[in-house]
Amino acid sequence: PFHPAGVRSLDKDTMFMPGSSFGQPMVDQFGQPYPVAGQPGLYPQLMPQPNVPSPASQEKAEDKPIEDLQIVGPETPSANNAAAANGAADRSAPKMPSTMQNDHPIISQKSGMFSDDEGNLKIVNFAVRRPCCSCCSVILICLIMTILLGAILGGDGGLPITDGQHQYDVFDTRSKAYDSYRLALERTDNDRDELKKAGQIEPRQANTIDIVYWIYEAEKDGGMFSADALDDIKAAEDIYLAHPDWKDYCVLEHFTPEGEKIPDADVQCVKPLSSMTIFYPDAFDEAVADQVMEELANEDTRNLYISIAPCVEKNIACPSLLDGVTGADENRTRALSESIDTITSQWTGRLGNPKVSDPVKMAKFCAYMKLLPTRSPLVDFYFDKEFSIENPVSMFTRSVFRFGAPREGYQRENQDKGDQEAEVKKFVKDELLSDMDDVANKGKSDDTNTFYFMTAIIFDIFVAILIRDTISAVVSVLLVFYYLWYMLGSLFLASTGMLQILLSIPCAWFLFRGIFQIQYFAGLNMLTIFIVAAIGADDIFVFMDAYKQSAHAGPEVNRNLQTRLSWVWRKAGLAMAITSATTCSAFLCTCVSPIAQTRSFGIFAALVILWDYILVMSLFCTSVVIYHNRFEREPACAIPYCCGCCTQGCSCDNQKPTPTEMNLSSFHDGIEIGMDKITKFFRTTFTDFILSLKGRVIILIVVLAWLIPAIIYVAKLEPTKTAEQFLADDHPLQYSITILNEEFPSSAEDPGLRTFFAWGIDTLDQGGVNQLMDDENVGEVRFKEDFTFSPQCQKKLVDACDMLQFGYMPGSQVPDANPLIRELVKRNEDGFFSTKCFLHSFHKHAETMHNVTGSTSGLLDIDRSMSSNGTVSLANMRTAMDAYFEDPPQQVEDWAMVLENVGFDGREVKWVSLEVECATLDQWSTLPEDTVRDVYEGMLDLARELDAFVGDACGAEGVLMTDQEQKFVFMNNQRIYRTSAISGAVIGVAIAFVVLCLATRSLLLSFLSTLSILCTIMSVIGVVTMIGWTLGTVEAILISILAGFSVDYVVHLAHAYATAYGEAHERLRSAFAEMGTPVLSGMITSVLASLPLFACQIVFFAKFGTFLCFTILFSWLFANFGFMALLATLGPAKPKDTDGEDQGRKEQTAGASFGSVEMTTVTNQME
């Protein structure tokens, strides 16, 4: 510990004289170094001035200002050394720098498991001796873990991110029903004889493999059915219809409406769902249209038509419906129906038809059709929900074009389906896409805005969006990097800091997947890049600020680099350990969620924060050593940085002293080491404002003025009532989906949610299910052993089918009498309820099996007492089912239904189901929880009615009701997100309070810190409610992890206050001086990391960025102003302890718990 100009290297026993590599120790009998003649800078010791009164009568040195303590040489009682001692004592002693206002302990020579006999940490000693070796070793370990992670993920095959199929609570009733039906379908399908299944041949292009959805928006008040707007629609749709190869890709119509097979040479494309079929008809008799509208304008005529329409149009339930109706009324209604048919029968969609002469009249005719339940399915699809006879103007319309499969060269739709889809996609991209983009170009038409989406190319759109939004992550990283560079003033430190941040993700992933064997890796986990960018930068600033503070910490701390870095390691390490533990614990709160996706995110985020802490204490620490040795000072050698960074010695004789040696010299020479401007601002100006009464009153007024409305808006937060969005409002795809969800009523042509009522399927066996460890295992399917597909069961199921189709009540034959069916089930284009039942085609197919039985009824047993259509006996069931699957019935739609409505495993029928289309829910949109729950409860009621009617006959009571689009499952997810948002926030705050209690050992500090966190949570929720957010899925997830983001800054300041000594104002000033700068830098870094997310098109990313930004800002504001103002008012003092006359006074420092080091005052050391 000599002046750098007179030292080459140093250990605890030997001082080496300048000019040689090895010298003799210059010490007295007490082991203290002698002053070297002609060289100022003798290692100072802090002690009372000589010749002062005895300790019993003198004022304690510790109570004096540090300026009153003199820097002198050691007292030497030996006579031979008296002159030297007196000379040293008589020397004019400089004062300590004014920036050092607190006593700084020195380290006693007491070794421990982690420290040497000088009190230095052994891990720091190694890093100082071999910094390059240490740095490279840490990086190598991280790279090995990354390579091993790649090998593990590569061995798993496929994408490393878990498929979103099971993002729900697998133990919930709705989830069990969904998985039970799905797995039962897979089990029986797999068990079925594959050879027989492989022989099935489906008609060419009979099924839909893809669709193109067009949405049109009117720019003018005349709506979409003005002459000019119709021309725009026609131009868009002729892209397909006029293409010479369209017939090779469209869905082909193989059967007449009566079910007769059309010869292959005569098949044509199924007409598209388009209003052009209406406005470009084969013919339009305006006189007939006027007559129909005139009659339907009469309410009595209209009501009569509605009441007997099933009989008049389909000859259904005529005796009951015509009861009380006069013959004249019946005839008049039949004539009206025929007149309507005269108009609608011309809507063939034939290519080349001319536009209708009076589009306005045709639109008004369609408005009258919407009033008739049996006719409205013909027009509902094409008109918006505001369209009516009072307002026969539709501002929106839509159309659908379908692509068919199996294609030429394939036997079935599912045969090499990916290849068939690729052929369709290639055709669209090569032949159609450029024209589609041209039509959809905004500004193409003054009358119409046009949008489209297609399943085959929508994936490419999403990839493009993901790539664009991924750039935001890159921008975030770059912003953090440049700010680190600016604040640290070193490209080297900024680079290693970013490397540490980035390496924490694969290292945590290796621990997550390779060590803990957690297979469920949610896509949500990738957001940790933004979290660790913010928290990692905060840790870097805390470490570097401690390193800068060590320059002011006194000569004992700056004795050498090992001592200095040990002080930094302890001080910064404990501060970061507390905040990291709090943040990790807050993220681990998500483990209470029953949804594996949320648990996976919480665990992974906690591991990332843990690894960031490990790397900042290892990799970044060694980088600071390299920075200290090679970059913090200008090189003195002829060749810059010629000295190796891994060795203590250097062959450059003119090397300048190290920064630590310069700090030591400055202390001896009384040179004040300057404080950076930001730290000085926090220590003086900012602290003075917080301590002033006026400042605290202003803070109180502002905080209350904000918190009151914020809390009011928190109370206004309510669950979302609209469909949740995936993309930003202004994205064309999202805009078109929003139009579909909000501007159109449900129509017969809209694919309603397919809802199944199944008998024979039992609930899953879920023993040993753990989604985190096995993301594919949700349970084992079970079948009810007592289920039997007997003739009695078949009859009841056929009756139930009719009941669903026509809306009968059980035991009744009156259509539309069942309110549940009328409310829940969508009507099809025939005006009846959309129900699918395989039994009709199955029985019809069995009746044609003459070659098997020789009977005219085939395998069908005709029992008029049971069913007019007959049933299949259990003895003939396997034969009939084998034939049914080998030779599908001509009605292809029926064949498609049978695959998902009967569980035939090749030996017996294990289960059967009936299917309806929901009137309210569809396959595309996500509606609010309350809306879906009403439908779900209604479907359960309908299921109970059906089971009471069917269950006994099939031998297994208990019907399973579910959908296969996860709408009911997601409804439960919405409830979980809402409740977990509250529980997650509460648990996070509670954990923060416990950690704060352990860290500060003060209930008051812990309470005030927790109050600051609660204010942050209230403010963030309040402000997002103000800007229009509702409690949807994204918001619930973010609120549940809010506490994890809110704790860092207040914990840093609380811990700094807890470890400071003196009166409350002194402790406050010390806390701001210690943590003001790193907390500010951490806040700025976090905000910079969040800003690029604002521009993301994916809603979750954009909301996450907004949420992160507000959380960081409010957390910083309440920590620095609210929390510290409360401490200035209520904060306790902390005098230094006195342990007795022999022990002296001891000061417990921030790092005392690291390395078993005893920290004592100078007085105790001198004793």
Image: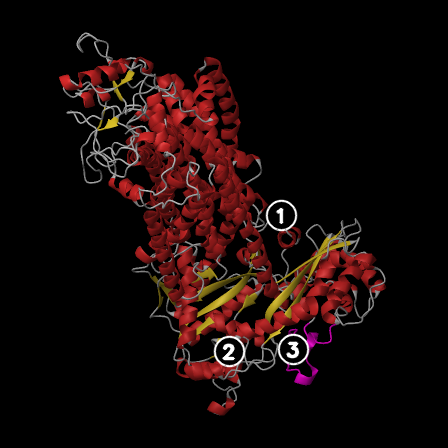
Quadrant containing the C terminus in the rendered view: top left
What residue range appears in magenta?
Answer: 243-270
Q: Nearer the viewer, residue 1148 or 396?
A: 1148
What secondary structure do most residues of the magenta stretch adopt?
loop
Indicate how the structure is coloured in the image: secondary structure
Gap between marks 3 and 1, in whole Å?
46 Å
**x 46%, y 62%: residue:** 946
On residue 842, the disc is: 2
Magenta-colored stretch includes residue 840: no
Task: Give the residue type at disc 2.
Answer: Phe
Q: Percent from the top left, x then y, of residue 941?
A: 47, 55
Residue at numbered disc 1: 729
Pick the residue in front: 992 or 75: 75
Q: Earlier in the sequence, mark 2 or mark 3?
A: 3
Q: Percent position (x, y) of residue 702?
A: 51, 22
- State if disc 3 and disc 2 touch (CB < 8 Å): no
Q: Which mark is residue 650?
A: none
Q: Which residue matches tag 3? A: 258
- Residue 617 placement: quadrant: top left
Q: Is residue 372 left or right of residue 55?
A: right
Q: Disc 2 versus disc 3: distance between alpha carbons?
A: 18 Å
